[in-house]
Image (cartoon, grey):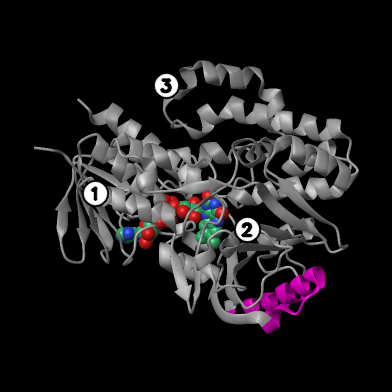
Amino acid sequence: MAKQAIVVGAGIAGLASALRLRHQNYEVTIIEQNNYTGGKLHAINRGDYRFDLGPSLFTLPYLVDELFELFNKKPNSYFNYHRKKNICNYFWEDGQSFSASANLDEFISDASQTFNEPIENIKTYLNKTEKKYQLTSNLFLEKSLHRFKTYLSLDTLRAIKDIGVLDLNTSLNNVNEKGFENPKLTQLFNRYATYNGSSPYKTPGIMSMIPYLEMYQGTFLPENGMHDISQSLTKLARDVGIKIQLNTKVNSIKTFKNKARAVVTDSSEIEADIVVCNMDVFTAYQSFLKDLKPPEKTLHQERSSSALIFYWGITKAFPELDLHNILFSENYKTEFDHIFNKKYFYKDPTVYINITSKEVKTDAPKGHENWFVMVNAPTNENQNWKEQTTYIREKIINKINRILNTRVENYIATEHVLTPVEIEKETSSFKGSLYGTSSNNKFAAFLRHPNFSSQLNNLYFCGGSVHPGGGIPLCLLSGKIVSDLIDHDHSK
Ligand SMILES: Cc1cc2nc3c(=O)[nH]c(=O)nc-3n(C[C@H](O)[C@H](O)[C@H](O)COP(=O)(O)OP(=O)(O)OC[C@H]3O[C@@H](n4cnc5c(N)ncnc54)[C@H](O)[C@@H]3O)c2cc1C
């Protein structure tokens, strides 16, 4: 009889783990508390506008394709996407703007001209970005960091030999300040710290490898927006016989002799040979794993930042904007101090505007746009979010109006708002953080929760709150690490 695997949570990592376990011939059931799959990768409609609720930036699409290929399915019969020619449009308060080309040579030449930066500085910086990624991705992103075997590889020896290149003992901001003469380029490359919810003034310089993904591997958009990712994987999961039980919350597990024996929901007890937890590991130890000893050190790590998002149906087209747009704060350092230390909004926030209708024409009526307007936010510490939302909404509108020379408030036809409280409530993400723990110190990668339990030998963990961290590509990789571990630990 086939072995039973239960996956708790239908986030992107839960779906990936479930598919990989199904491929190993497990009978797989995903149990999801919401009435939809995808977790943070969800979407809504408001009037004639469609909005992706969570992630907007898509890199390394081959990690999604791989899941279809496992079952000999053609990825493009489920899931299509295209590569963007332009990475992002950046705007500053002094009127300067910059369109970052996805063509590396074009980016280097445009950036050199726009910011009056010596070409050699940009080339040297990007070469180091590539080197850091090549040296560390196999070690830090593709394997468990908590198994001895990982350290016995050539890749590890190479990373140790070149440890100086990794800039572990300095901050990303210091690396960028040293790399560029123009502070605007420093700010542009500092922004990559937010890709894992960290501060550029605290996260180590190794994070300058993040732009490698965008600038060398490209940025992509699925044909019908980001929601396609979770929905196409959900369809695949059903097609290959994975059961998905929606509206069902896992409340506890039953154990026997260091093993999880069954998961318990409101309505039933489901026996399992393997349990994979995709929900936020912090919340998991407070809820369905509360009988296990919590790993205190791990659970006390600083959380990544959260976000506050306005989803606006806009009755006008803005040709100066593209799919991804950033309106920078004039004082980035103070903004991050507010997010991570003061825990409330800074008066001049960096505003990110994502507009999928630039590419997916059905996402808004003709001549209109669907704006996803996001500011980085502190984690939920029971601030007065109603007050904070009103405060920051006005600051955002003023900033957009100043920089784009408009009256955006006159064009908002529909509005939906997501605060850290809703992010926490809807996905059980502890304190509403977007990416689990922050990477605000050089040991963060080692302090993330492992992909397996040290207490129950058939309990595993995937998703943004565990190794290798948050964001779609890393969550997909966590699904791969978990299935490799299960194969190694249980195939006999
Ligand atoms: C606003 C926002 C913007 C983001 N932007 C980007 C971006 O541009 N690019 C990018 O790559 N990433 C981005 N991210 C991060 C990315 O969305 C996450 O890292 C990723 O989606 C997390 O996936 P996950 O598998 O960890 O699970 P989650 O999406 O967190 O899902 C966990 C699931 O578990 C379920 N669950 C919880 N408890 C239980 C229980 N007891 N029983 C049953 N089910 C349960 C939840 O309902 C949920 O569906 C963003 C996130 C947000 C919120």
Q: Which residue is mark 1?
A: 239
> Which of the two residues, 442 or 357, is positioned nearer the viewer here?
357
Q: Magenta region, mostly helix, strand or loop? A: helix
Locate the C terminus and report the quarter of the image it occupies.
top left
Q: For numbered disc 3, what is the local secondary structure?
A: helix
> Mark 3 sits on what residue?
149
At label 2, which amino acid type do we have? Leu
Tell which quarter ligand 1 is in: bottom left
Question: Residue 84, percent across and down?
Answer: 61, 48
Q: Are marks 1 and 2 in contact (CB under 8 Å)?
A: no
- Residue sitting at 53 percent across and 32 percent down? 140
Quadrant (top left, top right, bottom left, bottom right) of the N terminus? top left
Rendered residue at 18%/46% (across/down): 272
Three-letter amino acid code at the position of disc 1: Asp
Residue 371 versus residue 351: which sits nearer the camera?
A: 371
Are circles 3 and 1 on residues that touch, CB within 8 Å? no
Residue 439 in view, yes or no: yes
Q: Is residue 438 left or right of residue 475?
A: right
Numbered range of the magenta stretch: 386-410
Identify residue for label 2.
323
219 w.r.t. 123: above or below: below
Can you name the residue that lies furthest to the left here?
1
Judged left or right of residue 19, residue 141 is right
Q: Is residue 327 left or right of residue 430?
A: right
The mark found on residue 58 in the picture is none
Q: Is residue 164 above or below residue 93?
A: above
- Report whether 110 appears left or right of 353: right
| Residue under the image location 20 percent in, 66 percent down | 266
